[in-house]
Amino acid sequence: MSPIDVMAEMWDEGQPSPRSFLQDLYTHLHLESGFVFSTPSFFMMGRPVDLGADHFDILNPSMEFKNPNAWFVYGLAGDFREAMAHVPYYLPAIGWERRDSVKWWPMNEFLNKVDLLSQTGCNRGRGGDI
């Protein structure tokens, strides 16, 4: 199964999202500042956000921020290390939703963790749960 198929299945079967995977994918494709990458080895979509923003605004894929200071990863499956090489530009933090809260990491710490996982092969075939 391709990374985008893994993400779509996880989204539509397990995500408590008010929108379908295709709706969120479409929104990210049409944001001026959002991004979507889909390759045979990874799938990732997200956008820059403000760490101090309201939880609801961070989770709203239509919300764009004037002074973003973090990447919010809406979905990630496959090779984390390769995916991180495609983040459009550096921001000091990265985060994603997990169990109804947003988990934030300093970007450098996250990149170090991804590199360690990629060296052991632990991240292969896993989606969004680093």
Image (cartoon, rainbow, N blue to C red):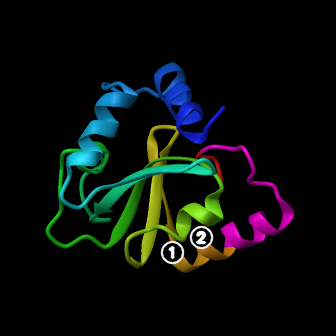
Q: Amino acid at mark 2?
A: Phe
Gap in Å between the C-alphas at discs 2 and 1? 5 Å
Please report the residue visible at 51 percent of the width from the left and 74 percent of the height from the top: 106
Q: Nearer the viewer, residue 18 or 4?
A: 4
Q: Is residue 34 above or below residue 60?
A: below
Residue range of the region highlighted in magenta in the rendering: 113-127
Question: Which corner quadrant holds the N terminus?
Answer: top right
The residue under label 1 is: 107
Q: Secondary structure at mark 1?
A: helix
Q: Residue at x 55, y 61 (%)?
A: 83
**Which of the two residues, 104 or 21, is positioned nearer the viewer here?**
21
Location of residue 119 (image quadrant) = bottom right
Left or right of 25, for residue 6: right
Q: Position of residue 48 (x, y in %)?
A: 30, 63
* Residue extending furthest toward the top: 13
Name the residue beneath numbered marker 2: 110
**3 vs 64, nearest the viewer:** 3
Asked if the residue at tag 1 contacts the one at tag 2, i.e. Cβ–Cβ closer than 8 Å, the answer is yes
Q: Using the rendered image of the protein, determine whether residue 56 is visible from the camera's viewpoint.
A: no
- Is there any visible trace of residue 129 in the rendered image? yes
At label 1, which amino acid type do we have? Met
Mark 2: few/some/many CA within 10 Å (<14, 14-19, 20+): some
Where does residue 130 sit, x and y in percent of width and height?
A: 66, 54
Residue 122 shown in magenta: yes
Point 61% across, 64% down: residue: 82
For mark 2, give the secondary structure: helix
Residue at image x 72%, y 44%? Answer: 125
